[in-house]
Image: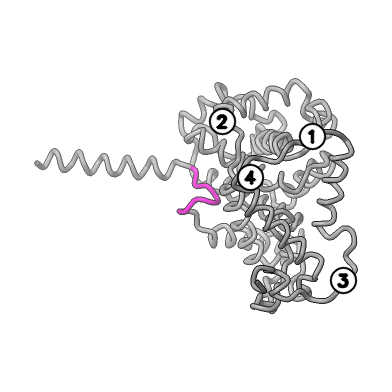
Amino acid sequence: LGAAAGGGGRARRLGRAKNKERSVSFADEKADLQAFARAAAREAAQEAALGTSVPSKPTLARTRNSTGTMFVNSTLDAPDRDATIKCVCHVLRAHMAAAAAAPPRDREVRARSGEFAAFQDDDEKSSDAIPTAQRLTAFYRDVFSRGQMEVECIVTSLIYVERLLKAGRGRIKLRPANWRPVLLSCMIMASKVCDDLSMWNADFSHICAAFTLKRINGLEAALLAAYGFNATVAASEYAKYYFHLRSMAARLGIEAGGDNLKPLDVVKAKDLASRSHRFRTDGGGAAAPAPAGAADLAKLKVRRAQSLGGEHNDVVRAATIEELIPDMGA
C-alpha cells in the first residue's frame, strides 16, 4: 500500500508539472485576466522609470448604460483598433515573460532544429531580452497598416498565436528568438481568413523586408501543419477573445472615449436593430450568397463604412430604448 501511495503521489506531481508546462490561453477559463493587466501595468511603470514612456492612470468611465440610454465606444464588429492592438501586444509579452521564467526543456530545444525550425529568427537568435510593448506595438501596427488588414485580424491573430502554442504542447514557446516569425505568420493567416481582398505573400515580403518570399511560404506551411490545416475560428471563440481584450483595455484605462462617450444616436441604433433582426431571421439558416461582382462588393464596403459611423452620421439625438428594440412597442 505504501508503494502504491508513493506511486500515486509521483503521478500527481508529474501531472501538475505537465499542467504547468502547458501554455495557458488568454481566453481560457483558468487564465487570470488581472495577472495580464498587472503585468502590463508593471511594464508601463518600468518604461516610465527609464524615461521611454509616461504611464497613464486607469480611469473609470463615469457613463453607464441604462434602460433609456446606451453608451457604446466599441462593438464586436467595430472594436477599438488601437486599444485592441496594445492589449494583444501586452498578452504576447506576458507569454514571453512566462516562458523566460524557466529554462527551455529538451523537447523545446530539439524542436527548434526540427518541426518548428521555421519560426526561429536569425536576426534575434542571440538576443535574450524580452522586447518592450512599444516595440511589439510598433511592429504590429506597421504590418497591420501596410498590409491594409481589417480590424477583425487583430483578435484573430492572437487566437492563432495561442493556438500554435497549444498545438506545440511545450515544444514551442514565445521567446525573443521567435516572436517576429510567429506573429507575422499568424497575422498573414488572419488576413487571408478575415479580409475580402488579402495581400499575397509576395506583398508581405515587401512589407517586411527581413522575410523573403520563400521564408514566408515556409512559415505559412509550418503554421498550417501545426494546426492540422484547421484555420477555422468559431464565432464563440472570437467573441470570447474580444470581450477578454476589451476588459483588459478597461483595466488598463486605454479605451477610446473614456468620459467623453456619447449616447448611441438614432441612425446607429436603427442600424444595430436591423442587424440584430437580420441575425435572428437569417443567422440560424443558410449563409448569405457571396457577392457576384465588384458592384456588390462596393455596396458591402459602403454599408460597412456606414455601420462604422463613416457616413451619414449627422443625427445627434440620443436613441431611446424603443428605437433600440422595436418589438417592445408591439
Query: To which residue does mark 3 refer?
Result: 315
**Mark 1 residue type:** Ser
Which element is circle 1 on? loop
Q: Distance between the Cα atoms at labels 1 and 4?
A: 18 Å
Q: Residue at x 51, y 25 (%)?
A: 110
| Residue type beneath disc 4 | Leu
Structural distance between the alpha carbons of marks 2 and 3: 47 Å
Where does the magenta region start and end?
23-30
| The N terminus lies in quadrant | top left
Mark 2 element type: helix
Please name the residue that numbered disc 1 is placed on. 198
Q: Is residue 278 above or below residue 200?
A: below
Q: Which badge, 2 or 3, is on the more N-terminal residue?
A: 2
Mark 2 or 1, which is nearer the eye?
A: 1
Q: Nearer the viewer, residue 215 or 304?
A: 304
Question: Which disc, if any, is residue 158?
Answer: 4
